[in-house]
Image (spheres, rainbow, N blue to C red):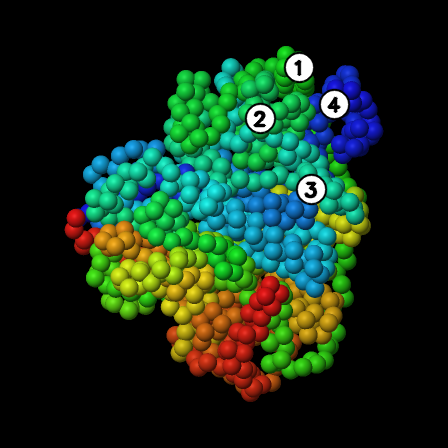
Amino acid sequence: MLRAGIVMFPGINRERDIAIALTRSFGQKPVMLWHKDPSIEGIDLVVVPGGFSFGDYLRCGAMAAQSPIMRAVAAHAARGGYVLGVCNGFQILTEAGLLPGALLRNAGLRFLSMDCQLKVARADTAFTSHYQQNEVFRAPLAHGDGNYTASPDVLDRLEGENLVAFRYEGENPNGSARAIAGIYSPNLRVMGLMPHPENLVDPLMGGTDGKALFDSLAAAST
Amino acid sequence: MTHTIIDVALARQFGLSEAEYAKVLEIMGRVPSLTELGIFSVMWSEHCSYKSSRVWLKTLPTTAPWVIHGPGENAGVVDIGEGLAAIFKMESHNHPSFIEPFQGAATGVGGILRDVFTMGARPIANMNALRFGDPRLPVTKRVVDGVVRGIGGYGNCVGVPTVGGETNFHPSYNGNPLVNAMTVGIAAQDRIFLSAAAGIGNPVVYVGSKTGRDGIHGATMASAEFGADSEEKRPTVQVGDPFIEKLLIEACLELMATDAIVAIQDMGAAGLTSSSVEMAGKGGVGIELDLDAVPQRETGMSAYEMMLSESQERMLMVLRPDRADMAAAIFEKWDLDFAVIGHITDTGRIIVRHQGRVEADIALDPLAEAAPLYHRPYELTPRPAPLGAVPDPVGLGPALLTLIGSPDLCSRAWIWDQYDATVGGQTVKRPGAADAAIVRIEGSQRALAMTTDCTPRYCLADPEAGGAQAVAEAWRNITATGAKPLAITDNMNFGNPEKPVVMGQFVGAIKGMSAACRALDFPVVSGNVSLYNETEGQSILPTPAIGAIGVIEDAARAVGLALQPGLDLVVIGATTGELGQSLWLREVCGRQDGAPPLVDLAAERRHGDFVRRLIEQGKIAACHDVADGGLLVAVAEMALAGMTGAHLFPSAEGAKFWFGEDQSRYVLAVPHAAPVLAEAAQAGIPAAHIGSAGSSRLTLPDGNSISLNEIKASHEAFFAEWFA
C-alpha cells in the first residue's frame, strides 16, 4: 500500500475532503505535510489538494509552487514518485513545472460549482486502473480558473503520447483546450485534474463515481 | 484631528441625538475627547445598541431544553446530540452591499463566519437571504452581480460550502438591497467559548489582520437612511480578505483545542471599541488598551481611527498569562499578527492609551446601562380586506409557465453555480435538491438541515401574519426533509423606526413570529436588526428573514424533492384557495392586494409532525412544501428536480385551487397513496391523492399538458437572458 501524504499550504481548503477519500479507499489515514517542511521522507504518494493557496492573489498556485516543500515534491517526482494535484493542486503542479500548460480564468469569467462528466482517456495507470477506458463518470467541480491551456505543440504531444487523463464529456464548462480536464507526466506518475472526484466517494453525497480513482491508487505499488 | 471641537453639532454628525449627547456629558462629567465621543456614538448606534428594537426583541421566546446559549452571545448554540452543538446566526450587511456590492457582501460573509468560529465552532455551511430591486433596472443587475460574486469570492476561498438561501426581487429594494448571511458551525458542547472577560491582569491579545482606516463609522452608517449621496459613503465600506479569514479560522480552532483562551470576541461592527467594551462589560471587569501595540496597516493613525476602524479579519482574546507564548507560536505558524495590546483591570473602566496620552477613560457600566432605549410610537398595519373573486385571465398552463419563469420563482442555478457547495465533503442535499440543505456532521451519521425564509409581500400587507408565516415556512422546510426543527436566527430588516408605520410593521412581525415560535417550539437563539433601510424616504418591504436549523439522526433518511416515475402524489393540508398577495395575482393578474394567508399554527404542527413521522418511517420518496405559487408550482418544481413528469387527475378546480397559497401544506411522492391517505384520515389530517409521477410531460388537471422541457426552458430563461 502506498503511503499517502497531503501537502498543506495556507489557504488550501479541500485537504479534509481528500483525506476522507483516501482513508475510505486505503483503510488508513494519510499523513498531513506542512508547507514549511523541507522533507517528505517516507511518502509514496503526494497529494496537493484544492483551495486558494496563499489566497491565489498572484496567479493561482504561483506562490505555493515556490514553497520549500515543493522542492522536495519535485525531487520525489524526479525519482518516479506518485503525485496527484487536484484543482488548486493541479494549478500548483503546472506552476511548479511538474506538468505542462496552465489554467486560465474560466471562459465564462465566473467561478463555477457544478457537476461535470469526465471521460477516462486511459485506464491503465495507477490513477485509473479501477475505471474502464472511455468510461464516463460524474465529478463535482468548483473553480474560477480551470481553463486548461498550452501551446498547440504541447497539446499535440500530450495527445500523441497519450498523456491526457480525463476529458470533459458533453459540456466543456470552462473552455479548456481540447476539453482537457486532467493530464499525466510522461512517466504517468504525476497527474493533475481540475474536478473533485474526492467529493463523490459516498452514496450519501449523491454517488461514488470518484471512488475508483482512490481505489486505483490504493491498489498501486511503488 | 486634535483641533476638532467637540460639541453637540459633532455629536449629531456622529449619529447621536441632542438628548443622547446630553447624557454623554452627564456620564463623563466633562466634554468627551474625540475618541470618547466616537466610542459613545458607535456603542449607542442603532446597530450596536438595538435601542429601537430591544424592548420588542425581549418578547421573543428564546428557550427550550435543547438551547444552550440564546441571544446575547456572538451566535446561538443548540444541542444536536452526541455531545455536539450547532452554533449559528444570520446577520445583515445591507447598507455596505448597496454602496459597494462585492465587498459589502463579501465582508458580510466574513463577519458572520467570525461570529460563529469565535465561539469555538468549525463553520460547516453558509447560506444567504438576498433581496434585490426591480430586475429591469441596470443598477439591480450590477448589485446582483457584485453581491453574488462577493458571497462566492469569500465563501469559496475560506472553504465553507454555501448550500442554499433565497432570492427575491421587489422595487422597494431598488436603493436598499438586503444581504443577510448565515453561518452554521459545529462544536463540542464542552468546548464553547464565550466573550465575558475575566482574570485581573490577564493579557488582552489582538490577532489577525492589521488595522487600517477602512470602515470607520460603518456601524453609524448602518444606522441611517440613505440619501442621493450614498455613493460618497464608499470609503466607509470595509475590504475583505478571505485568505486571512481562512488562516484565522484554522489558527483560532488550533488554539481553542488548548486551555489558553479565557474569552474571545471578533472585531465586527465598531471594531476594537465594541469588542473591548462588550468583553469587559460582560465580565464585569475593566480593560486597558495600549494602541501603540496594535498592528497597523497605515502610518499616523489616531486613537479615534483605531478604535473606530472596521478593518476585517481581526479577533480580540483574553488569554491565560502562562499560555501567551504558546498562543503566539500558533499564530506565528499561520503567519498572522499576534499582539498583546492591553490587560484586564478591576476598575470597571475602559482606558485607552496612545503615544503616552490617555485618549479615552470611560466607566463601562453607564456606557452600557445608560445606552438609549426607546419605546418608539407605533401604528399597527390593519389586516387588509379579503380578496374578492378574481377572474382567471389565462388558464392553468400559461399561468404556470409565467409563474415558474418569473424572477421570484425561476431557477436560481445561475446563483448557486457560483458558490462552492461541496467543499468539506459533507453536503448531502445541495442547493435546490431539497426544501432545506442537508450537511452531514463529519464522522457522524447525523446531519443538519438548514433554510432561510421570509415572504416580504405578506409582511407588508399584514406584518403579524407575515411574521408568523416566515417562521412557519422555515419550520416546514426543515420538516419536509425529515429533520426535526430546532431553533431560528432572525434577521429583522425594516425601514426607519422613527416612523410609526414602520415601527408598527416591526412590532406586528415580532408578534407573529413570537406566536409561531411558541406554537412550534422553535425558539430564537440569535439574530440581528437592520433598520433605516430606506432611500429617499422609501422604505423596503418589512423583511424579517428567518434562518433555521434542524437535526436528522440518520442523514440517509433525508428526502429531497425530486420526483421519480411511478410514485403517487399526495397533498397534505387543506386547500381553500388563498389568492390574496399570491404570486399568481401579482405575476398573472398584475395585482398586489388582498390579505395574505393566515397560518393555523396548530394545524401547521400537526401536519408537519405527521409528514416527519412518515419520512422517519421511510414511507416518503420525495417531499416539497407548498409555498410561493401554490400547488401546481410545487408539483412542477418536483417534476423539474427529478426531470420526471406527472399526471394530475382531471379536476374542475381552477386557478384559485391550483395557485392559492394556503399554508401548512406539503406534496408527498409515495409508492402508494392509499396507506398514506388512511394514516392521514386516522390522524385527522386533510390529504388528497392528486396524481402520479411519470413520463416527460406534466398533464394538468384541465386536461392540457406541457412538456417538461418547455417548463424547464421557462424556468431557466430569466437569469440566462439577464446575464447573457
Chain ID at mark 1:
B
Q: Which residue is mark 2?
A: B296
Q: Which mark is residue B1?
A: 4
* Residue at figure coordinates x 73%, y 52% from the top left: B175
Residue B669 drawn above or below residue A173: below
CA neighbours of label 4 inside 10 A, class few (<14), some (14 to 19), many (20+): few
Same subunit: marks 1 and 2: yes
Give whichever of discs 1 and 4 has the lower sequence position: 4
Q: Chain of mark 2?
A: B
- Residue to which mark 3 is pinned: B234
**Residue under mark 4: which chain is it in?**
B
* Residue at the bottom extreme of this rendering: B703
What is the C-alpha distance between the residues marked 1 and 2?
Answer: 19 Å
Labels 3 and 2: the sequence-earlier one: 3
Q: Which mark is residue B294?
A: none
Does residue B497 appear in this view?
A: no
> B16 and B391: which one is in front?
B16
Q: Which element type, helix, strand or loop, lies under badge 1?
A: strand
Do residues under tags 3 and 1 come within 8 Å of each other at their CB atoms? no
| Depth check, front residue: B560 or A134 | A134
Amino acid type, mark 4: Met
- What residue appears at the point 22 percent right and 56 percent down from the top-left corner? A126
Q: Residue at x 46, y 50 (%)?
A: B161
